[in-house]
Each structure stands twice: as C-alpha cells, then as structure tokens.
C-alpha cells in the first residue's frame, strides 16, 4: 500500500480536526463544571476526580496537536529550503548571461572603429 503524501497541508488539516475535538471536549468540561458548581467550589474529591477523568484526555490531545504543529512547521521549512536552491540556480543562470553594453557598436564588439583615414582613402 503506498504511503500518503507528506505535506504540511495534510498535517494542518489534521490539526484543524483535532482542534475541533479539543473545543468539543472543553465545551463538555465546561458544562460539567457548571453543573457541579457547589461541589467544585468546595474543592476536594470532586475536583480531583474531574481532573483525573478529563484532565489527562485534554492534556494528551493538546500534546498531540503540538506535535502535529511542529512537524507541519518543519516540513514547511524543508519545502522552502528545497525550493530556494532552484531559485538561486535560476538567478545565477540569468546573471551569467552577459548584459548588452551601452557602448557596444551596432556592428558588434569585434568591428574595428571607423577612422577618418579609411573614409578619406576612398
């Protein structure tokens, strides 16, 4: 089975999906916190239980998002670095072509300059 393309865009799309999942989890957590207002205000067991159940899920999801972001950024930089030498080679080729000089004669650079003697002899 062929491997999928390694592109930063693919990773960015996955990051968007994971961010939506994170938002959904946070919304659920907010609902839980609000429904347990009194228990949370007192602290203690309910808060610890909530953190154990929901905190690790959110923590690991955020770590996963972070890893995807770092890999996406690294691949983007690699793609830019790969494109840069091509641009430099193209610029070098353009710079190596001699530019037409303003003092060049229309007959060409190798044509001898016209002298008065040559016109007087004729």
Image: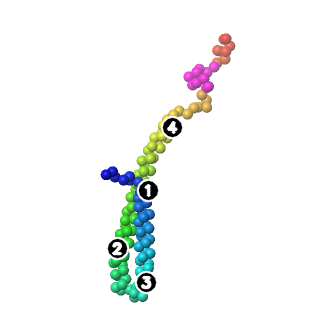
Going from N to C along the chain, the mark reached first, 4 or 1, is: 1
Residue under pointer 4: 94
Looking at the rendered image, the quarter that the C terminus falls into is top right
Residue under pointer 3: 35
Of 43 and 17, nearer the camera is 17
* Up/down of 105 relative to 12, above or below: above
Residue 92 appears in the rendering: yes
Going from N to C along the chain, the mark reached first, 2 or 4, is: 2
Q: Nearer the viewer, mark 3 or mark 2?
A: 3
Q: Nearer the viewer, mark 2 or mark 4?
A: 2
Q: Residues within 10 Å of mark 2 (few under 14, many from 20)?
A: few
Gap in angstroms between the C-alphas marked 3 and 2? 21 Å
Q: x%, y% of residue 88?
A: 47, 43
Residue found at x 34% / y 85%: 45
Q: Residues within 10 Å of mark 1 (few under 14, many from 20)?
A: few
Q: x%, y% of residue 25?
A: 41, 73
Residue found at x 38% / y 58%: 71
Residue found at x 66% / y 17%: 116
**Highlighted range, magenta:** 105-114
Compared across the picture, whether 10 is left or right of 105 comes to: left
Residue 69 appears in the rendering: no
Colour scheme shown: rainbow
* Up/down of 38 relative to 117, above or below: below
Gap in angstroms between the C-alphas marked 3 and 4? 69 Å
């Amino acid at each position: 089975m062929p491997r999928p393309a390694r592109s930063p865009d693919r990773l960015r799309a996955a990051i968007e999906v994971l961010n939506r999942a994170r938002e959904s989890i946070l919304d659920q957590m907010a609902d839980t916190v609000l429904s347990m207002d009194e228990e949370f205000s007192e602290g203690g067991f309910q808060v610890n239980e909530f953190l154990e159940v929901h905190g690790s899920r959110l923590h690991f999801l955020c770590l996963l998002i972070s890893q995807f972001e770092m890999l996406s950024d690294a691949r983007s930089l690699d793609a830019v670095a790969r494109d840069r030498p091509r641009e430099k080679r193209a610029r070098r080729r353009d710079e190596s072509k001699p530019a037409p000089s303003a003092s060049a004669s229309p007959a060409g650079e190798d044509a001898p300059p016209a002298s008065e003697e040559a016109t007087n002899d004729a």
